Amino acid sequence: MYGTTGTATGVSTPHSASSLRPLVITHGSLEHALLVPTALHYHASELRQRFQSTLPTATEELALDEEPSSVPELVARFLGYVAEQVVEGEDDASGTYEEVLRLVLSEFESRFLRANEVHAVAAQFPGIPSKRLDVVKHYYAARQAANRPLKAHESALFRAAAEGKAGVYAVFGGQGNIEEYFDELRELYHVYEGLVEEFIVSCAQVLSSLSRDPKAGKVYSKGLDVMRWLQDKDSTPDLTYLVSAPVSFPLIGLVQLSHYYVTCKILGKEPGDLRSRLLGTTGHSQGVITAAAIAIASDWESYAKVSHDALTMLFWIGCRSQQTYPRTSLAPSVLQDSTNEGEGHPSPMLSIRDLTLAQVQRHVDATNTHLPKDRHIHISLINGARNVVVTGPPQSLYGLNLSLRKVKAPTGLDQNRIPFTERKQRFANRFLPISAPFHSPYLEAAAPIIEEDLKDITTFTKAGLAIPVYDTHTGEDLRNSAAADSIVPELVRMITNLPVQWEKATVFEGATHVLDFGPGGVSGLGVLTHRNKDGKGVRVVLAGAVEGTNVEVGYKPELFDRDAHAVKYAVNWVKEHGPKLVKTNEGKTYVDTKFSRMLGRAPIMVAGMTPCTVPWDFVAATMNAGYHIELGGGGYYNAKGLTEALRKIEENTIPGAGITVNLIYVNPRAMAWQVPLLQQLRSSGVPIEGMTIGAGVPSLDVANEYIQTLGLKHIAFKPGSLDAIQSVINIAKANPTFPVILQWTGGRGGVGLGDVDNRLGWRPWQSRL
């Protein structure tokens, strides 16, 4: 639709009016005509000519990133160009250009937006992401230049929240997600400048003043000149300075507060109106202060005041934490070794993913036995079942990494045929770009100093919280805490020395949607929260990102889309796939699962295993009892024996009962005669319905051949590793209409995925099975 070439005529003005003349905007095969009053046509034509001279020479396929990819984008670019001329004062005394701007703006809205919001519409346009972002930028710049304030519009998501059909919570990220958070602020300022500039300027003035406070010492050696850095990219300090806690703490807060500010502005709502659509909020590490701020602010005046106070709190927490724990230097050999091993630049905080909390604790305890007490390391953030952060001196954490290397599987190591208990562990351990040991005893001494710095902050109180704000250590609603009315001391200690228990903080009763206001986009807190909530019916929307590569989460267009069908809900695995009780017409009650529906049998199976399910009479008896079972093909060494067993099962079971055979893939000699035999017997009428492959997963091509040529009703696999699980998923995706069964084995027989604790390592795959 949006890439259509040829002439498109505007619908905002009647074609028959004699006082109107067509103005045609073209680029290559793209063409759009809008009707312009005769009195404006000369000036509109002049603007069009100058605009088209700014476009590159059209290519046959509109292949250049610099040229428009669709008619709406072409019109949006023209809209942005006219807006720029008006803002720069190129208009004549009678405001002719501004009249043209209003006309083109009305044309764009009626022809392309059609009562929807620009983010939602632009998301469907072709081309690279920056083109869609520019459409948004041009539209809001035009509204600003035309003095067209945004009216209040309820998006579909927030309308659902108001009607009780959606439960929406907000979260705000912390340190360590990405180093380039300032680029996110720059993009936000660049795209929504007319909406957010006044707010950012006021916040920048607060931070600039704070950075000159004598108490800040020398930690702001390159200043804190936000507006200069935004407007002149070359003046922006290096990443090392930007990720230092004194700088990143307040600036990450500014990113989040600006995202929320822009969201309110686009929806045409006061901060309190948007807050009323939220059931609660919290923030990861420093993000809890932004969460408290949006829970307090009710109108634009209070939002400015609370934002300035929040930035002041973040400023002093970052500053005093760094003063309490100054940066230390390490030997060049340590730095190089960490980099070579893919562990990053040593810092006071180390992320470890895909090991359980108990496993990490054992390594931490072992490391601490070799360290003096004042150099100990501590688990400081528990982000999920297999996602923790360890905090301490960088040299001590380097020692932990040396220990972890001994048990870590090298990249690319194939362990599919190694018994589970003998395998090396697959996990990721990497230093975070953070300059101080937050959430640990090392910053306990900083807390009272910070509280003294913030003694004049009076806005952050329990009474001021209009919605729940959840404690990141206990998960408690701060409105119910036993502390005094001021929540400043609690917020400070949640960041300096109290560990984060993220799953406790995000129980989120009744949640259907969680909005992540950044920073980090797909690398931020939202995706982490999505992993924790996967399968629980909670959809995460990255409210700070217009689009991204992760298809399992939503993006900014979902916040603003007004279409009633735009609200997307996540699947609750228990409700969607869990066992249910069903009653037949005869009044009998059965347990109903996807597995039992497919096989027409009880939802419990007797899996094939040599020698347990080799005897044909045991298999026949189990089938007659109403259960699914697999004949253990590994116990048969020639075609005669297997044929006799299958014939006897057929003769001694209820007519029509399907037989499933389990084959051992690791035995290619047996597979070479067993698979053709099953095909032959099935062709001759033996009711062989299924085949299970254990001890290995075949390639996609081989699996497809089995599915397409053997005449089976279902096929099953018994993967023994995460890679093997992914292979089974790929087979299922390639055969969406054919039943593919995945069997998880406990590993007691020397293969499989281990015990119930270790299954959490492959839980992300469960949603795809």
Image (cartoon, rainbow, N blue to C red):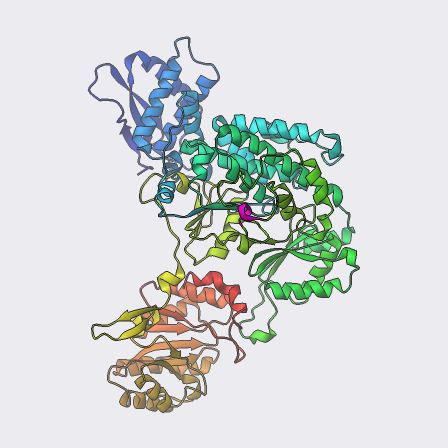
**For this rendering, which residue is in front, 149 or 611?**
149
Q: Is residue 34 left or right of residue 216?
A: left
Residue at screen point 64% across, 50% down: 432
Q: Main secondary structure of the magenta part?
A: helix
Quadrant of image for the C terminus: bottom left
Quadrant of image for the N terminus: top left
**For this rendering, which residue is in front, 309 or 536?**
309
Q: Relative to residue 156, is residue 437 depicted above or below?
A: below
Q: Quadrant of residue 557?
A: top left
Q: Relative to residue 294, is residue 103 depicted above or below?
A: above
Taking the magenta stretch, the answer to whether it contains residue 70 is: no
Tell how many labels. Answer: 0
Q: Is residue 328 left or right of residue 242?
A: right
Q: Is residue 412 left or right of residue 546?
A: right
Which segment is the magenta one? 477-481
Residue 343 spot, x, y in % from top left: 66, 55
Q: Relative to residue 637, is residue 472 depicted above or below?
A: above
Residue at screen point 72% across, 30% down: 213
**For this rendering, which residue is in front, 748 or 715?**
748
Taking the magenta stretch, the answer to whether it contains residue 479 is: yes
Residue 47 in view here:
yes
Residue at screen point 41% across, 48% down: 167
Residue 65 in view here:
no
Q: Is residue 601 left or right of residue 205?
A: left
Residue 728 spot, x, y in % from top left: 43, 67
Residue 607 spot, x, y in % from top left: 41, 80
Residue 66 spot, x, y in % from top left: 46, 33
